[in-house]
Image (tube, rainbow, N blue to C red):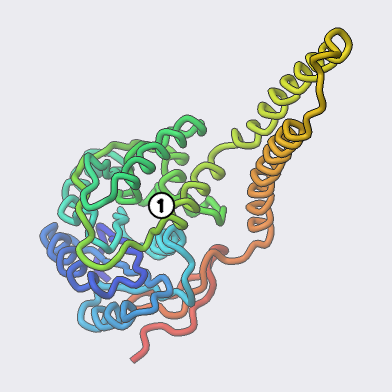
Amino acid sequence: MDKILCSVIVPMYNEEAVIIETHRRLTQVMSSIGEGYEIIFINDGSRDNTRAIINDLCNKDTNIKMIDFARNFGHQIAITAGMDYAAGECMVIIDGDLQDPPELIPDMIKKWREGYDVVYGKRKSRQGETAFKKFTAKAYYRILRSLTNVEIPVDTGDFRLIDRKVCEALKQLPERSRYVRGLMSWVGFKQIAIEFERNERFAGETKYPLKKMIKLAMDGIMSFSYKPLKLASYIGAILSGISFIYLIAVLIQKLFFPETSQSGWTSLIAVSLFFNGIILLMLGIIGEYIGRIYDEAKGRPLYIINELRNMEERQGPRYSIKQNTNPD
């Protein structure tokens, strides 16, 4: 087998409308480099014709490879699977919707050859996205930076190149609620940004609706920060102090100004609901952390593979044995 310089990792979920164009542009870019490459499509339990199209591409070109999940395991797990199976000296992670330009890959490889271990794309602008999404994304990255002790670059996604040694370091991290871009910052190594204009989707609809965006944000915050747990202590101490002051004020009013004191069920219920709401919020935060501990304790594989195309079977603690390999 020819030496592979670069593995391109492309998670796919219901992307039948874009996959042909994604393949064309990626193949054009990688062929222009003039060295061995592979493009790994991870079919993350798609319900459309994504798997069939990738399978057909694998039949026509051995540089195209497929990891077919048994079900949908999620975008971050799909990226992890791609890194587990990638054979290149470096790997590029890119979404299949063409919002991140494949034409930037040669520039990333150039920076890698200059000695950088991680070359990440930093968005100068986000075309085709709503003002709400732009605002919340910008706010989230800055909140995450303030909550964590890890320097996670702002305005970046998963579009990046990593060196083989970074990939091997990431394989040593077993957590299941994965926030890959945060893990890449955590492992360290020499990193640099390349700025670019993020395009609109080439076709199809976003696979990251608000619900998934919130989950990803929670994974980022709770995987790299204990400050939400400390927040419970801080809020508890502040509310206890306020309650004590209020109690003293009520006693003074009752003892020295009895004519002004009056029973107020409305205020009592309002205060009670406020404190109960705070308690439930804190219990929810604690429960979120406990739930993640429970997921880790079960020790299940990160993903289950239904089929591999144009690549060898591997086994490890994070993934299960596939069922079929390179069927005729």
Residue carrying label 1: 167
Q: Position of residue 230 (x, y in %)?
A: 65, 31
Quarter of the figure with residue 65: bottom left
In this view, 84 is above or below 273: below
Q: Position of residue 162 (x, y in %)?
A: 33, 49
Q: Residue at x 41, y 33 (%)?
A: 142
Report whether 224 appears left or right of 156. Answer: right
- Quarter of the image with the N terminus is bottom left
Report whether 189 appears left or right of 240. Answer: left
How many marks the image carries: the answer is 1
Question: Closest to the observer: 7 or 282?
Answer: 282
> Residue placed farthest to the top in the image?
256
Q: Amino acid at mark 1?
A: Cys
Q: Residue at x 59, y 33 (%)?
A: 227
Q: Residue at x 39, y 48 (%)?
A: 165
Question: Closest to the observer: 265 or 89?
Answer: 265
Q: Position of residue 87 (x, y in %)?
A: 34, 62
Whether residue 89 is visible to the viewer of this picture, yes or no, is no
Question: Closest to the observer: 238 or 115?
Answer: 238
Q: Residue at x 36, y 84 (%)?
A: 326
